[in-house]
Amino acid sequence: MSIKENLQIYEQNAQNYAEAYRSLKSPDVLPYFTDRLAKVSKPESFMVLDLACGSGRDAAYMAEMGFTVIAVDGSKEMLSEAHRCHGHPSVEYMQDIGPEFNALIRRGQKFDVILISSFLFHLDKAERKQFYRTLSMLAAEDCYLHILLRYGPCRDDRVMFDVPVKELEDFAGQYGFKFSQNAPTKDKLNRSDVFWRAVDLNRGYIKGLIPKA
Ligand SMILES: C[S@@+](CC[C@H](N)C(=O)[O-])C[C@H]1O[C@@H](n2cnc3c(N)ncnc32)[C@H](O)[C@@H]1O
């Protein structure tokens, strides 16, 4: 199934997906990430990117914390849900499609923090290879990347791939990031056969976000 067909499913079911995503709170879904962001003393000096932002739940949460956020998604309907329920003056929502995210790349912006939550599994191996190139162009020198990976079967028509953690470790090594992974966590929507793993990539000490070694 192509990226286009996968996105079509989000277009057609945006309200249902957005409702499910809104039923969870960002700190429950992204505990490691939100804990880390909470320690930042000057969030306004960070440029944050939420890639494949979906319902906008996490973008709005980060904006509430004081960060400036660009939140990108390929689905117009998901973005309209995001505007409707999670509009915020510090969030700019933008439509663009991965793995290339050409419109975003054309802006030439670099980001201090990049969140990729629950998206990478939509890309096959070749697409992920392209996505890592895209990421390398979007990451600021001291960028901190948080990636939430999903494992387990999908109960609807969307196509999902299991992403080997080793692949992210290799990407980290190639682009000079320090790699770490967190313990797997259970699914917050109570699906017993689904679990999640959060991966952190960072390049050095950045404005208080990554503790000095
Ligand atoms: C499972 S949702 C996750 C949304 C959000 N990050 C979260 O954690 O709640 C996946 C999102 O990826 C978007 N998406 C899927 N394929 C995409 C692609 N090729 N390019 C851009 N966005 C895509 C969908 O529209 C959907 O909003």
Image: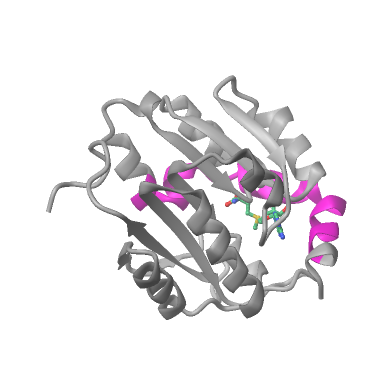
The residue at the point 69 percent across, 51 percent down is 102
Outermost residue toward the left? 213
Q: Is residue 7 magenta?
A: yes
The residue at the point 32 percent across, 55 percent down is 202
By secondary structure, the bulk of the magenta-drawn segment is best described as helix
Please give left or right for residue 153 compared with residue 26 in the image.
right
Q: Is residue 159 above or below residue 134?
A: below
Please give left or right for residue 175 compared with residue 151 in the image.
left
Outermost residue toward the top? 89
Q: Which residues are magenta?
A: 6-33
Does residue 119 appear anywhere in the picture? yes
| Nearer-the-camera pick, 19 or 75 | 75
Does residue 153 appear anywhere in the picture? no
The quadrant in which residue 85 appears is top right
Q: How is the image coloured?
A: one colour
Residue 18 x, y percent position in the rendering = 70, 45
| Nearer-the-camera pick, 36 or 170 | 170
The residue at the point 24 percent across, 52 percent down is 204
The quadrant in which residue 177 appears is bottom left
Q: Quadrant of ligand 1?
A: bottom right
Q: Is residue 178 above or below residue 126?
A: above
The quarter of the rendered structure image containing the N terminus is bottom right
Residue 124 x, y percent position in the rendering = 66, 76
Label tally: 0
Residue 88 x, y percent position in the rendering = 60, 23
Residue 199 x, y percent position in the rendering = 39, 63
The quarter of the rendered structure image containing the C terminus is bottom left
The quadrant in which residue 10 appears is bottom right
Q: Is residue 155 magenta?
A: no
